[in-house]
Structures are given as structure tokens and as C-alpha cells.
Amino acid sequence: MQDEIVEKLPKDGIPLTPQMVHCLLEGMKNNHEPERAILLFRDIRKRGVKPRIKTYNFLISMCVENREPEEAFRILLDLKQAEGEGAVTEHSWWLVLEACARNGYVYYSDVDCINVV
């Protein structure tokens, strides 16, 4: 359904706004479709829609929750490239690092401490 909306809106002359994108992605998460949400996010980025920082952070958290640390890291780097270094919070870095550690990409002994809330 969300994919169809993304396809039809521009054809009907309705611009796809960052707020709409966020709502569509939240809907996919609520429907337990994180993979589709990630694919939709990539498609939307290719279409030139600039997501809100809130949307990037939402997707990073969703990827972490769904044990997708590599995708969380890609999205974090995309945020950094799109919005600049200052857009990426320390919390986001720690969130991704913790997900990587839980999945065996980084070992807890490799960092000083991991206390992510």
C-alpha cells in the first residue's frame, strides 16, 4: 500500500513531503515490515526527497531493533553526508555501535564503555 502511494502521488501532481515519508515509514514499522521500510526509504532518497533528521533517527532505531546493524550504519552515514557532521548525535553513534557489538561486528572490549540507554 505505501509503495503504491509513493508511486501515485507524483503522478497526481501531489508532492511527496518529508512528513509524508516519515508517516509511511512508521506505518511499515507498525505493520512489522522493516525491510520494506528500508527499501522505501532508499527509493524515496533516489527520487530526491530529503527526509527529516527525525526520519533518519527513526530508521536507525528501527534497524537496531530489528538486528540490522549494517543498515543502521549505512543510514547513519547517509545522514552525515546529507546533513553534515553536526546532524549525527553521539547517541546515534552509540546506538549503532551497540547494535554492531551485539551482532559480533565490534567487541565490547574494543571500546571504553557501552552504556546506551
Image (cartoon, rainbow, N blue to C red):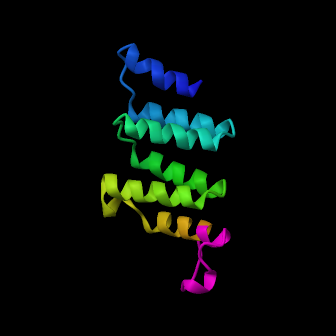
Residue 117 in view, yes or no: no
Residue 8 left/right relative to 108? left
The percent coordinates of residue 37 (x first, y second) are: 57, 40
Q: Which residue range is magenta in the image?
A: 100-117
Looking at the rendered image, the quarter that the C terminus falls into is: bottom right
Q: Nearer the viewer, residue 83 or 73?
A: 73
Residue 100 against residue 25 in the figure, above or below: below
Residue 10, horizontal then vertical, whole percent: 38, 20
Q: Quadrant of residue 9?
A: top left
The part of the image, by quadrant, that contains residue 47 is top left
Please report the residue visible at 67 percent of the width from the left and 70 percent of the height from the top: 102
Query: x and y percent of residue 104 in the render?
Result: 66, 72
Quadrant location of the N terminus in the rendered image: top right
Judge whether 47 appears above or below 7 on screen. Answer: below
Q: Nearer the viewer, residue 114 or 8?
A: 8
Q: Is residue 27 above or below residue 11?
A: below
- Compared to 18, does 7 lie above or below? above
Residue that sits furthest to the left in the current view: 84
In this rendering, the count of numbered labels is: 0
Q: Is residue 85 visible?
A: yes
Q: Is residue 101 magenta?
A: yes
Principal secondary structure, stretch drawn in magenta: loop
Which residue is found at the position 59% from the left and 53% from the top? 63
Q: Residue furthest top?
A: 12
